[in-house]
């Protein structure tokens, strides 16, 4: 997969972090499937530009701050897995959170056509609800 597709994904993350929904919608396929963990208010499956706008509106209603910091781009034939950190502050409580993520992007003709996001939603939900996060580590 050419380097220009990784650059395209970097533009998507930059648009997300700036809150530039128009650029985000322009940089993905018109029929994109956007799937994030359902435990967060902006989670679930959304489709197309209207779905992206719904995601962005819900996200901005709940979170302040830089959202996605991609660290690694792992490339396969038609997918790129992006590993990184999600961080922000819950507007209602002022509590901050940070979690690691894995985003699996499917590209069709070089354009992002599907996102599947994986992360531990518990620290985010705990920040939104102003309570301690339950540990995902059974040793803690």
Image: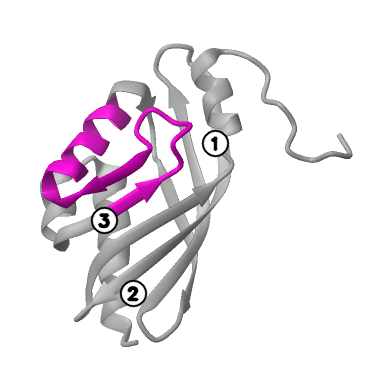
> Which secondary structure, mark 1?
loop
> Which secondary structure, mark 3?
strand
* Label number found at residue 121: 1
Task: For marks 3 and 1, give the one nearer the viewer.
Answer: 3
Packing grade of label 2 (10 A; few <14, some 14-19, many >=20) is some
Does the image show residue 128?
yes
* Marks 2 and 3 close (CB-CB < 8 Å): no
* Marks 3 and 1 close (CB-CB < 8 Å): no
Going by the image, does 140 lie left or right of 96?
right
Does the image show residue 20?
no
Q: Residue furthest right?
A: 139
Give how far across and how far down residue 95 sits, in percent. Answer: 53, 19
Q: CA distance from mark 2 to mark 3?
A: 19 Å
Q: Which residue is mark 2?
A: 6
Going by the image, does 105 lie left or right of 133?
left
Packing grade of label 3 (10 A; few <14, some 14-19, many >=20) is many
In the rendered structure, which segment of residues is drawn in magenta?
Answer: 33-60
Give how far across and how far down residue 88 sits, in percent. Answer: 45, 33
Q: Which residue is mark 3?
A: 33
Q: Residue at x 38, y 33 (%)?
A: 65
Q: Earlier in the sequence, mark 3 or mark 1?
A: 3
Q: Earlier in the sequence, mark 2 or mark 3?
A: 2
Packing grade of label 1 (10 A; few <14, some 14-19, many >=20) is some
Q: Quadrant of residue 109?
A: bottom left
Quadrant where the N terminus is found in the figure: bottom left
Q: CA distance from mark 2 to mark 1?
A: 26 Å
């Amino acid at each position: 997969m050419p380097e220009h597709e990784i650059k395209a994904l970097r533009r998507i993350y930059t648009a997300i972090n700036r809150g530039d929904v128009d650029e985000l919608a322009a940089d993905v396929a018109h029929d994109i499937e956007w799937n994030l963990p359902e435990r967060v208010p902006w989670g679930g499956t959304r489709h197309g530009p209207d779905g992206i706008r719904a995601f962005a509106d819900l996200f901005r209603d709940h979170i302040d701050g830089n959202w996605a910091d991609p660290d690694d781009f792992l490339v396969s034939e038609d997918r790129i897995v992006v590993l990184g950190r999600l961080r922000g502050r819950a507007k209602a409580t002022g509590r901050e959170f940070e979690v690691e993520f894995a985003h699996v992007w499917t590209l069709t003709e070089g354009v992002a056509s599907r996102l599947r996001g994986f992360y531990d939603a518990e620290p985010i939900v705990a920040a939104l609800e102003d309570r301690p996060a339950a540990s995902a580590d059974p040793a803690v």
